[in-house]
Amino acid sequence: MRFFIVVIILTCILALAATIGAIVVGSQSFEGIVVDKPYEAGLAWDEERRNQESLGWLVVLQNATYKTGKNDLVIMVRDKNGALLSDAVVSVVVSRPSTRAFDRTYRMVVQPDGRYRTEIDLPLYGNWGVIIDVSRKKEHTSFNKVISADQDKQ
């Protein structure tokens, strides 16, 4: 009987230590609010979706795979008729979902074939958010994509 009581006490102590450890690690690694004004951000997101629908633009990522380190990011932007939109200004923000420490903005350069290209840096493996801003004349919209970087096995 005494053995079971000792096992239960040890199990409770281990569970309490694991919980405290998780709280300490979590509080040290979380940066706080993900979105400064979530309600307003939600309204802006809805408006952006309506704007995308009215413009009819489509963004397609050409790269199928990414690795940690330097990568070429190539996209095609098509108008509502399916024609390449090669006279736009395109920039991308690459960010890590869990932290703002790796957020980077890149300006894309239009290529002779009408696609847009830039070199991005993905220092860590895993998922990355890509926000693609497209502007042409007085029209503007943003597209959100998710890419994943595999570890570079050199």
Image (spheres, rainbow, N blue to C red):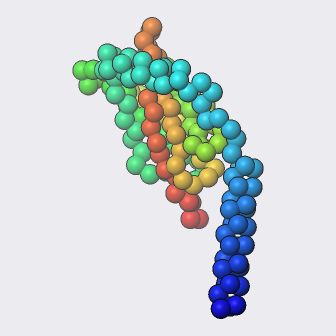
Which residue is farthest left?
A: 81
Q: Position of residue 60 (x, y in %)?
A: 37, 35
Q: Position of residue 4 (x, y in %)?
A: 65, 87
Residue 90 visible in the snapshot: no
Residue, x 53% and y 44% (percent of image)?
128
Q: Position of residue 55 (x, y in %)?
A: 33, 16
Count numbered badges in the picture.
Answer: 0
Residue 152 visible in the snapshot: yes
123 vs 14, nearest the viewer: 14
Q: Quadrant of the N terminus?
A: bottom right
Which residue is farthest front?
A: 1
Is residue 124 positioned above or below 106 on the image? Answer: below
Residue, x 67% and y 69% (percent of image)?
15
Q: Position of residue 20 (x, y in %)?
A: 73, 60
35 vs 57, nearest the viewer: 35
In the picture, measured across the screen, residue 30 lies left or right of residue 51, that is: right
In the picture, measured across the screen, residue 94 lies left or right of residue 47, that is: right
Is residue 150 positioned above or below 102 on the image? Answer: below
Residue, x 73% and y 67% (percent of image)?
17
In the picture, measured across the screen, residue 102 lies left or right of residue 82, that is: right
Which residue is farthest top?
A: 138
142 vs 11, nearest the viewer: 11
Q: Quadrant of the C terminus?
A: bottom right
Residue, x 26% and y 25% (percent of image)?
82
Is residue 118 positioned above or below 38 on the image? Answer: below
